Amino acid sequence: MTLQITIRPSGHTLACEAGDTVLQAAMRADLMIPYGCRNGACGTCKGRILEGSVDFGPHQPSTLTDDEKRKGLALFCVARPQTDIVIEVREVRRAGDIQIKRLPCRVESIVKPTHDVAIVKLKLPATERLQYLPGQYIDFLLKDGHRRSFSLATPPHSDELLELHIRHTPGGFFTDPLFTSYKGREILRFEGPLGTFYLREDTDKPAIFVAGGTGFAPIKAIIEHMLHHRIPREIVLYWGARAKRDLYLPDIPGQWQAAHPNFTFIPVLSEPAADDAWPGRTGFVHQAVLDDFRDLSGYQVYACGAPAMIDAAKRDFTALRNLPADEFFADSFTYAAETEAQ
């Protein structure tokens, strides 16, 4: 049996399949409401039932008291509708709507698809989940006050393990031990989510993504979010790297392109190796966009990579191709050894 949930004050309505929690139904409908633990322990998702009834689900009695239940409050991560319901809860549509947390995590796995890139997966405590917008990043909190920022490569609907794509900076305070001595199971602390690089969903404009190196990480999260929720916008991904081996996850965009007619993948190599036998595009990745599009006035552009690439893309897309300045969104990565090895 399918029930209906209406959210106030937004007025959004969504379907809830039998057995689903309010949070599960909202996430399936791409309507984000606040959450933390997803198991009734933290209280982040607490809201009010205005009409209808729910099974309150398993939860900590101190997080939702009997008196609060009588007043119509519920924990939407565990509450399951029994009838059509109307609820009162704020929705998350921008970075400022999400609580920034400091959490411990365990390094679950480290895979090195190339000599200088590691794919690191993190596991949170059983009572915690991180709510974030696809494209945001976290800061590792290291000894002596050091911080290192890395984008989340996993979309919010697939957050059991948090995935990071980390490039090795020789001499780096964090990346040197990660690449030389970390074996997994290490315990770290981080703060997040952070940043304003995330998908703007209040438009149907086609989206062009420009990734340089591990700038692919947050773009991967955004595109997987779009494809999972069947957002019908045209999506074009340009991924720039030095040589073929630096496209460290080439099969993933290829799979997206094979499965989704609204997605196009264009890899671009700046210095292909002789044995790459590269048949594709070469040069600077932002130049490939300029070559393919004469007018960007009806587009959004999301760019992530080295500062020089970001600066050139913004300058040329706006000045030469009529991209509105407020439709250019960027996350500028820095790999400078002097900032890494403080």
Image: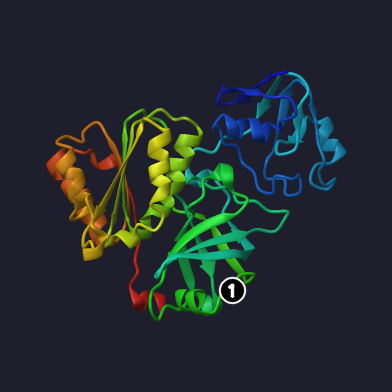
Q: Amino acid at mark 1?
A: Lys
| Residue at the spot of label 1 | 183
Colour scheme in the image?
rainbow
Q: Tell me if residue 166 comes above or below residue 318 in the rendering.
A: below
Residue at 40% across, 75% down: 340
The residue nearer to you, when weighing 39 against 241, is 241
Up-down: is 102 above or below 136? below
The N terminus lies in which quarter of the figure?
top right
Residue at image location 64% in from the left, 30% down from the top:
25
Q: Residue at x 61, y 31 (%)?
A: 26
The quadrant holding residue 141 is: bottom right
> Total marks drawn?
1
Q: Nearer the viewer, residue 242 or 163?
A: 242
Is 147 placed above or below 43 here? below
Q: Can residue 196 be seen here?
A: no
Viewport quadrant of the C terminus: bottom left
Q: Position of residue 104 (x, y in %)?
A: 64, 64
Q: Element at badge 1? A: loop
Left or right: where 155 falls relative to 243: right
Around disc 1, counting alpha carbons within 10 Å, would you say few (fewer than 14), some (14 to 19), or many (20 or more)? few
The image quarter in which residue 108 lies: bottom right
Where is residue 223 drawn, in percent x and y? Answer: 42, 41
> In the picture provided, is 23 more to the left or to the right than 191?
right
**Residue 231: percent from left, percent from top:** 44, 30
Residue at left 59%, top 49%?
A: 159
In depth, the one of 308 and 292 nearer the eye is 292
Judge whether 27 appears above or below 211 on screen: above
Q: Position of residue 315 (x, y in %)?
A: 18, 50
Instruction: Judge whether residue 37 can be spotted in this image.
Output: yes
Taking the image as shown, residue 141 lies to the left or right of residue 52, namely left
